[in-house]
């Protein structure tokens, strides 16, 4: 696996200076960096599916899958092998080179559900698609089991800076995010890790997140840039939609700071015009998530995406163009691993607690109506 080592040590001040440059100058430099390290007319398409929806014990302020909030998300059990196989075949037929599977878990547990996920990974791997998972925190051995099953990439977003993280999540620590990425890297898998803008964070927070990603060695192969999709019933439901200019700045800055990384234009594309998305591609984004939903939030139709690519002359990337297909390891035995104790910070977030109480009241009302 040819993973690039860090070429420059950045400071927050340097990244902020880049972010705040005149927009056209910023995009020109980002486009120049992009053309140096990437094919500007090629785009990588990933399909994201939820293999286990809702019921998560975390309190992420942006997430409609948190069990403590009252949203329209219905809790579903794990998808079957057949369901995932069908999804993989459809994704490949429509041009995706990667299938990403998400489960609304705080962390992976060594149980039958995890064994089932390993079977799902093998199923997608057998379809000659890059297979990615986002399952929450994973231990070193769990990461190795996923790698042995043929997992190509693991997604674990930092979300924001370490400082702002405490303002949106209180049920896990930032250090757990970094430890999970370390465990994934030890298993020799590629890393997908980015964040969300539009949650009320400052430009400095955005740039500090990029600083942290730049300090990972090697740096992540993929960095998703998400625009918050404000969902009713979550503590961030009143947040205003991120302007396209902010997305372009974030994409361009990410491209310059992380030159070898694939920058993924992720959640929030339904609020962007086609011209805005193309501007992001010019600024260095070379990957999208396809499918009518990103786990639980809306996403553009894949046929609209393909039509856009044809109009602007972009070609879809084939599986394993960047890194070789991982080998499956069969029949391996694993030693008993000590139970990992992930952190639970002691602080409370007022808005999260408020929406937890509101959800409890609404559920009580509905129960009384019955």
Image: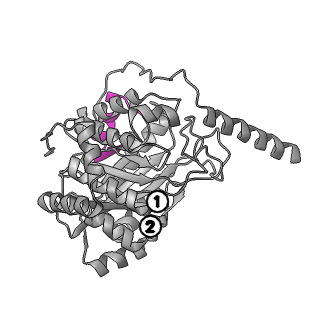
Segment colored magenta? 137-156
Of 146 and 204, the residue lying toward us: 204
Q: Farthest right residue? A: 369
Say which mark, if any, is on residue 234. Answer: none
Residue 149 drawn in magenta: yes
Displayed quadrant of residue 333: top left
Q: Residue 283, percent across and down?
A: 26, 62
Q: Residues within 10 Å of mark 1 (few under 14, many from 20)?
A: many
Q: Residues within 10 Å of mark 2 (few under 14, many from 20)?
A: some
Displayed quadrant of residue 265: bottom left
Q: Residue 320, percent across and down?
A: 21, 57
Say which mark, if any, is on residue 272. Answer: 2
Going 29% across and 65% down the picture, which residue do you hit? 281
Of 319 and 251, the residue lying toward us: 251
Of 363 and 14, the residue lying toward us: 14
Residue on which the image places disc 1 = 268
- Helix, strand or loop for disc 2: loop
- What coloring was used for the rendering? one colour
Q: Is residue 192 above or below residue 284?
A: above
Q: Residue 180, percent across and down?
A: 35, 32
Q: Is residue 23 left or right of residue 230?
A: left
Quadrant where the N terminus is found in the figure: top left
- Helix, strand or loop for disc 1: loop
Q: Residue 102, percent across and down?
A: 45, 48
Q: Farthest front residue? A: 22
Count of picture labels? 2
Are the residues at dot 2 and dot 1 in contact (C-beta closer than 8 Å)? yes
Can the viewer see residue 338 in this picture? yes
Going 65% across and 48% down the picture, which residue do you hit? 233
Q: CA distance from mark 2 to mark 1?
A: 7 Å
Of 28 and 17, the residue lying toward us: 17
Q: Is residue 131 left or right of residue 362?
A: left
């Amino acid at each position: 696996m040819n993973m690039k080592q860090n070429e420059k040590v950045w400071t927050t001040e340097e990244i902020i200076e880049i972010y705040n440059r005149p927009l056209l100058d910023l995009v020109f430099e980002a486009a120049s960096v992009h053309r140096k390290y990437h094919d500007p007319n090629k785009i990588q398409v990933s399909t994201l599916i939820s293999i286990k929806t809702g019921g998560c014990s975390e309190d992420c302020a942006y997430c409609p899958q948190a069990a403590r909030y009252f949203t329209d998300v219905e809790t579903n059990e794990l998808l079957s092998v057949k369901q995932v196989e069908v999804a993989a075949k459809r994704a490949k037929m429509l041009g995706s080179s990667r299938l990403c599977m998400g489960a609304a878990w705080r962390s992976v547990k060594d149980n039958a559900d995890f064994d089932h996920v390993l079977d799902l990974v093998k199923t997608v791997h057998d379809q000659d698609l890059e297979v990615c998972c986002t399952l929450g925190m994973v231990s070193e051995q769990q990461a190795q089991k996923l790698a042995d099953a043929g997992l190509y990439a693991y997604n674990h977003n930092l979300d924001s800076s370490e400082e702002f993280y405490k303002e949106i999540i209180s049920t896990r620590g930032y250090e757990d995010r970094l430890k999970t990425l370390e465990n994934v890297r030890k298993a020799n898998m590629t890393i997908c890790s980015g964040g969300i803008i539009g949650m009320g964070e400052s430009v400095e927070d955005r740039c500090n997140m990029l600083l942290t990603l730049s300090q990972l060695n090697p740096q992540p192969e993929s960095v998703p840039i998400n625009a918050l999709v404000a969902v009713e019933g979550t503590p961030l439901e009143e947040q205003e939609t991120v302007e396209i200019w902010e997305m372009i700045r974030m994409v361009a800055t990410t491209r310059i700071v992380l030159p070898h990384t694939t920058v993924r234009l992720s959640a929030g594309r339904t609020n962007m015009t086609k011209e805005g998305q193309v501007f992001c591609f010019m600024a260095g984004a070379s990957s999208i998530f396809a499918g009518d939903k990103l786990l639980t939030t809306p996403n553009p139709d894949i046929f609209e995406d393909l039509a856009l690519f044809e109009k602007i002359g972009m070609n879809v990337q084939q599986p394993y163009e960047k890194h070789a297909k991982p080998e499956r390891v069969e029949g391996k035995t694993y030693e008993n691993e000590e139970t990992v104790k992930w952190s639970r910070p002691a602080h409370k977030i007022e808005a999260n607690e408020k929406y937890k109480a509101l959800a409890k009241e609404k559920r009580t009302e509905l129960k009384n109506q019955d």
